[in-house]
Image (spheres, grey):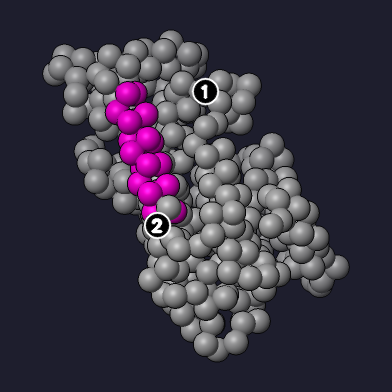
Amino acid sequence: MQSVSDLLKVLQDQWPLVAQNQHPKGLYEPIDYILQLPGKRIRPVLTLLTAACYGNYHEAIEAAKAVEIFHNFTLVHDDIMDEAPLRRGNQTVHHKWDLNTGILSGDAMLIKAYQCLQQYPPEVLAPMLQLFNQTAIQVCEGQQWDVEFEHMETVTIAQYLQMIQYKTAVLLGCAMQMGAMVHKADEKEAALWYAFGLQIGTAFQIQDDYLDCFGNPDTFGKQVGGDIIENKKTFLYIHALELLSEEDKQQLLHLYSLQPENSQPKIEAVKHYFIQSGAAQKALDAVQSYSDQAFAILDSIAVDESAKAPIRALAEQLMHREQ
């Protein structure tokens, strides 16, 4: 069984093959740039690890590439929508080049993802395309809901969970199910890999909401309190509004109407309401619940435990990020 670090090296050798030294350079250099930026590569690694449970992981490399190229395509376009200057500590594509380049290179990346999948024989490609297309449209729907939530007065937990599952978790599920599909795993068993990825992805995103408020700034990798500064309607915010007294609820709503020059007092005040209301604990409980459900699904998959061990270890690592 290959280690995660071994698989990351395998994948790293693949990225230059996608767009390097292709012309016109104005189209392909930005693609090569975004794919070569350092990242965790969780999705393609999970594709390869799942495939390795059934046979040679090499047969899943094109599927893994498709997932990661698609993921990075969404990042290029998301950065344009968010007017973000940085991605992984480096300039975003549209800032390093220009807006039109970001749009066109992103479009080309989506096509490149499909070109990876077309390497598979028809009996594998047909169900894989159905899953990939379903996932792709759900990611777009999740992004749109995220945008619309900014202008909605009330967002329910059910709406929020569907948004994070579509925007984030479904691609994890897709990555794992495609890894099983490569080796023509039983259809029901392949669906279990999807379910596992969906639950882990949901837990990861709720944990991200929690760490955004209460994480260690030295290890979290993003600005702590960023969601509060941007007035994002997160898992904690939605629960806090449900649980606070009317007076405290109005105070929280008021805080979320402000954009102070010094954001630290606002961050601390909001965090106080998240703790006082019990919303912070609800987030931790939800992370544990979704994680437990995920590992129960993993236990139910009829694959040798030694083959599942690297997947279990990676998922546990994701669920135990430092606070």
Q: Which mark is residue 24?
A: none
Q: Position of residue 265 (x, y in %)?
A: 43, 10
Answer with left or right where residue 321 lies relative to residue 282: right
Q: How many marks?
A: 2
Assess whether residue 293 is covered by the magenta stretch.
Answer: yes
Pinpoint residue 91: horizontal percent, then vertical percent.
70, 42
- Provide the residue designation for mark 1: 323
CA gap, disc 2 and disc 1: 30 Å
Query: Could you say which disc has been placed on residue 300 in the image?
Result: 2
Q: Nearer the viewer, residue 90 or 221?
A: 221
Question: Relative to residue 160, is residue 219 drawn left or right?
Answer: right
> Element under label 2?
helix
Label 2 CA crowd tier, 10 Å (few <14, some 14–19, many 20+): few
Is residue 43 covered in magenta? Answer: no
Q: Is residue 209 above or below residue 137?
A: above
The magenta segment is: 280-298
The secondary structure that dominates the magenta segment is helix
Q: Please report the residue visible at 58 percent of the width from the left and 21 percent of the height from the top.
A: 217
Residue 35, image x, y percentages: 71, 56
Amino acid type indicated by mark 1: Gln
First in sequence: mark 2 or mark 1?
Answer: 2
Locate the N terminus and report the quarter of the image it occupies.
bottom right
